[in-house]
């Protein structure tokens, strides 16, 4: 006698132990989702939280629950927002980014880009340009280059301790910008309200998911201003120029001077 088709037998076993089978499938699905999520977290490389299961848990359970969208621009028109009434530092000629926004990792910290990543060559060029700019301006006393306080892994560009820190600079503890040197080459930079709006509208970046979240003050002792932006990783030389111009606009806003922009022509260091 021919044996019954295997699928049918599997179905019969499943049917007999329906509840147990369903919860086993559920457990496997939940486990693979969790594993996938954890691996995604690790794939960003080290960032602002411990690079292990503890960091992942904090980012996933706690920070995801309080994080917010990053693309609206209404808040920048609020006259109560510091510097909302002042012109930005970006040149009027900021072009529109040529493609749709890249996929961003689901974890608010570290905020990282998952799609549209640059080649190794372009990423190295960006790092070189960023560091050149930092050291040139440091030599002129305009900024200070030291370890990022927002993300402990990367070198950041700061308002010097000798200069006055305005209210937004105090919120970021002086930090203006850093590049995510590890893997993706995206950039965090603090911009004037007017420039935040321009950058979001032209498709070059978005807010950090924890920007303006007040409960953060209780959790970690500080609030990230709505001016704290992610700039997508540049993919070619032209995009490096745009990214560096945005970085310079951040330096201008945070140091309260247009000197950085005057030293270098727009769209070229
Ligand atoms: C993760 O790293 C942090 C800081 O280095 C440490 O305190 C914590 O115990 C680590 N957790 C695990 C599960 O290894």
Image (cartoon, rainbow, N blue to C red):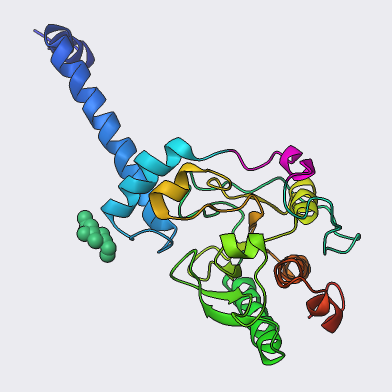
Instruction: Check the image and report above or below for 267 versus 6.
Output: below
Q: Which residue sits furthest left?
A: 1
- Residue 204 is left or right of residue 208, and the answer is right
Q: Is residue 46 on the magenta stretch?
A: no
Q: Residue furthest bottom?
A: 139
Q: Is residue 100 left or right of residue 67?
A: right
- Residue 125: percent from the left, percent from the top? 65, 78
Ligand 1 falls in which quarter?
A: bottom left
Residue 30: name its quadrant.
top left
Magenta portion: prevailing SS class: loop
Q: Nearer the viewer, residue 164 or 183?
A: 164
The quarter of the picture where residue 7 lies is top left
The magenta stretch is 69-80
Of all residues, the one furthest to the right in this rendering is 92
* Residue 10 x %, y %: 18, 15
Q: Quadrant of residue 92?
A: bottom right
Does residue 233 appear anywhere in the picture?
no
* Point 54% across, 62% down: residue: 184
Q: In the rendered image of this protein, does residue 200 appear above or below residue 135? A: above
Vertical arrangement, residue 1 with respect to residue 138, above or below? above
> Who's the residue at 63% across and 65% down the image?
169
In magenta stretch: residue 75:
yes
């Amino acid at each position: 006698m021919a044996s019954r088709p295997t699928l049918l037998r599997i179905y019969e076993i499943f049917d007999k132990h329906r509840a147990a089978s369903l919860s086993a499938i559920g457990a496997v699905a939940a486990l693979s989702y969790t594993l996938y999520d954890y691996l995604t977290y690790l794939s960003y490389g080290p960032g602002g939280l411990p690079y292990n299961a503890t960091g992942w848990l904090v980012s996933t359970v706690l920070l995801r629950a309080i994080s917010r969208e990053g693309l609206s621009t209404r808040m920048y028109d609020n006259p109560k927002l510091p510097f909302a009434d002042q012109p930005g530092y970006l040149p009027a000629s900021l072009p529109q980014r040529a493609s749709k926004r890249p996929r961003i990792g689901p974890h608010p910290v570290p905020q990282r880009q998952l799609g549209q990543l640059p080649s190794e060559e372009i990423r190295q060029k960006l790092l070189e340009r960023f560091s050149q700019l930092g050291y040139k301006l440091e030599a002129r006393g305009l900024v200070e280059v030291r370890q990022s306080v927002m993300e402990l892994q990367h070198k950041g560009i700061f308002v010097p301790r000798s200069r006055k820190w305005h209210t937004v600079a105090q919120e970021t503890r002086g930090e203006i910008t850093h590049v995510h040197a590890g893997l993706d080459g995206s950039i965090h930079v603090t911009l004037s309200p007017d420039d935040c709006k321009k950058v979001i509208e032209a498709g070059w970046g978005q807010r950090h998911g924890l920007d303006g979240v007040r409960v953060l003050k209780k959790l970690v002792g500080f609030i990230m201003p709505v001016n704290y932006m992610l700039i997508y990783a540049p993919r070619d030389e032209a995009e490096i120029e745009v990214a560096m111009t945005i970085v310079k606009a951040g330096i201008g806003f945070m140091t309260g001077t247009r000197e950085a922009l005057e030293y270098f022509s727009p769209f070229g260091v």
